[in-house]
Amino acid sequence: MSGLEIERKFLVRRGGEYRDVAFSASHIQQGYIPAMGATVRVRVRDDHAFLTIKGRSKDGGLSRYEFEKEITLDEARHLMKLCQGGTIDKHRFLVNSGNHVFEVDEFHGDNEGLVLAEVELSNVAEEYEKPDFIGLEVTGDARFYNSHLLTNPYVAWKDTVPEEYR
């Protein structure tokens, strides 16, 4: 899969109601391979693995080019050895809302307590229905990029996030 990825990212209000309405839940571990001008991610999601390359955003984090290919679990294990800074560990819940699916990520380890949601759109002006648990938009805020959370974990700066999201 390749093309332009358009997504919006949000903090999730405390309470966990997204778990009650989720139609899917999975465990994800991912790491990042150093690269100039792109983000190279290796991800294992339950029993599937993916290699993803994302270009830089030119519009404040709303959209960027993305290439993704499914790889074998063995290939992912080998590529994880090239990742620097450890891995991101999280659980992802998928929630339907209108014509869209929100991906809600609960982070673990040094990012414990952080819960983010993303929705992918077909164009930057596309409208969508936000579930009640969706809060403050953080699209384009680099602190909330998974690759950034490896070097600057949430535990170190969570006090800067409004209390209703901690």
Image: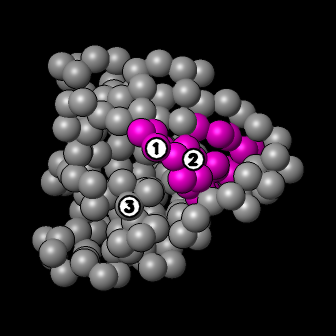
Q: Nearer the viewer, residue 5 or 54?
A: 54
Q: What is the CA distance from the residue labelled 2 to the residue labelled 1?
A: 13 Å
Disc 1: CA contacts within 10 A as few (<14), some (14-19) or many (>=20): few
Q: Nearer the viewer, residue 28 or 147?
A: 147
The chosen color scheme is one colour
| Upstream in sequence: badge 2 or badge 3 | 2
Q: Amino acid at mark 1?
A: Met
Whether residue 16 can be seen here? no
Q: Residue at x 58, y 64 (%)?
A: 84
Indicate the position of residue 148 as horizontal and vertical percent values. 38, 61
Q: Where does label 3 land, which residue?
A: 148
Q: Residue at x 42, y 39 (%)?
A: 37
Q: Nearer the viewer, residue 110 or 56?
A: 56
Q: What is the CA distance from the residue labelled 2 to the residue labelled 3?
A: 12 Å
Q: Which mark is residue 36?
A: 1
70 to 158, vertically: above or below: above
SS of the residue under disc 1: loop
Image position of 11 (left or right of 31): left
Q: Which region shows up in magenta?
A: 27-52
